[in-house]
Image (cartoon, helix red, strand yellow):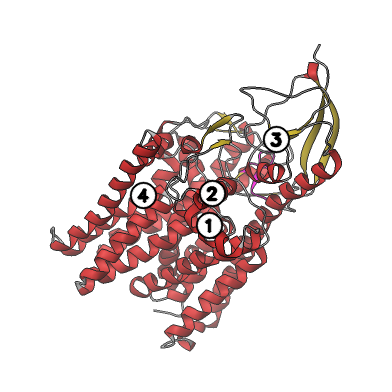
Amino acid sequence: MARSALEPFLAGRRALRLLLLGALTALTLLPFAGKALHIDDPMYVWAAKQIQKRPLDPYGFEVNWYGFPMPMSNVNKNPPLTSYYIAGVSGMFGWGERALHLAFLIPAIIVIIGTYLLAERLSRRPLLAGFCALFTPVFLISSTNLMSDTLMLAFWVSAVHLWITGLKKRSAWRLVTSGILMAVSALAKYYGMALIPLLLVYSLLERRRPTWELWAFLVPVVVLGAYQSATHELYGRGLLLDAASYATDHPSQWGRGSIAKVLIGLAFTGGCLGAAWILTLGTWPRWAWLAGAGIAATVFLSAAATRSIGGSAMRVGEGSVWTAAALLGVFAVGGLGILALGMQEALKRRDPESWLLCLWLLGTFVFAAVVNWTTNGRSILPMVPAAAILIARRADGWGRGRAADLRMATVAALTAVLAVGSAWADFAYANSAREAARRIHDKYWSTTHTLRFEGHWGFQYYMEALGAKAVNLAAPSAKEGDILVVPENNSNVYWPKENWSILVETIQVPSSRGIATMRSELGAGFYADEIGPLPFAVGEVPPERYFVFRIAARK
């Protein structure tokens, strides 16, 4: 099979390859180390601060995340391992954003190196697989946050690698270690539990019958059972099953299991993987090209003409609907192509490793697009290593010689630019909330009135750090003269009543340029498809607006 010029140059230099990938990952993510706390980051940091006070009670405090105080155990639907990691790092280096982001370089590097090690066994282009995994929008964006996703994936990839090598070498210690990593992955983010059925099916396909190695699965089962019991004792209900019920019971505006929801899942899959899937296009037969073009055109025309997906409004601005519809069609075809690639490889090769990659992709997609209440980039992230390995396998079909290398290099450059651009857009969006909090505090902080705010995410973290008070909808306490700030592009925001508030000013803070990850006007909803049906969108990104009200005497 054909290889790029770089592959034979590094042949036999495994340590150099690993060093190259690790260094490339670090250098790519270092510019984002100053990123402000963003989306759910504050919840992990608040829990980490609680852990430093009471290590065995990570969620034993209240938080105002939905407009009124609630027990943290009711709000946070993720396990506490990430917060323990943050607590340990901050205990040594402090709570500064840079120190915390630098600590999260470690799991990001593990993911990329783990992808390479897996690809060594499953493809001829492990370096390309590592590159494709690194330069995907979903990996770069997730790795510049303090949430649990990249940490979970680091343990996930390590567990898969050790399980495969453990089965091949009949190594008990590798299998037991893999079982421990399965449990730890699930304690970073509950989706890590999916490793148990995934690797169980792989083991049965590899051995063709139950064998003694399956006893290693008792390790994650026992650990997670103990966690369920311990959290039930602490908080009155087991948090593992509580999170599962939340993911399946919470309604979706697109309709759970609907065609619209599946289409959005495909669009998130294609968009989150950026341009990496283009490397597979060179091997598509002519009928697949025609089918893909037909599907993209149909989605584009339908969404643009009706301004809806499956009857649900896209809520995209007039100047962006055509662009959003075009991206929806292209991303959906890209996502469909990745899933089809996994199924084709499994049916063609019929070996356990190909089925592992296929089920890895399909399982993640079903959870993200059908089971979970919202489709988001964080739910797509686990499929990145499997998709990267499959893309590296298929890239051999591009042919040999300088022309093939040039085509591949062009696609690789496009992939890197798109991934870094989307990550930079999210970086700018996160930082705009920190800048807004600073401006608002500097202008409106006073000892004679209270500065209050709605909205959550990073904006809440920085406003509270500066002394402002989150609005409590359950027990309003605003007095005449108080200042109320309402962000436009945030969660759980309610416009104040006209009869007791006066709009004083609208503060605008520049955000990203050209690309947005969370703007309903453009159809971008990377963190929640209820904001938009695309993981990111292109167009003119409006500034972030914050409406400042003064509480007046009630009439």
Work out whether mark 1 precedes mark 4 in sequence or the reverse, and give the earlier one.
1
The residue pinned by badge 1 equals 86
Circle on res. 269:
none
Work out whether mark 3 precedes mark 4 in sequence or the reverse, and give the earlier one.
4
Q: Can residue 197 be seen in this view?
A: no
Q: Can residue 272 be seen in this view?
A: yes
Res 200 quadrant in image:
bottom left
Q: Which residue is drawn at 22% across and 54% down?
A: 218
Work out whether mark 3 precedes mark 1 in sequence or the reverse, and give the earlier one.
1
- For this orientation, the residue located farthest to the front is 53
Residue 66 placed where, x, y %?
58, 32
**Residue type pointed to by label 4:** Gly
**Residue type pointed to by label 1:** Ile
Task: Indicate which label's residue lies in the foreground, 1 or 4.
Answer: 1
Evaluate if marks 2 and 1 touch, with contact meaning CB atoms under 8 Å apart: yes
Circle on res. 44:
2
Q: Which residue is drawn at 45% across and 49% down?
A: 80
The residue pinned by badge 3 equals 469
The residue pinned by badge 4 equals 363
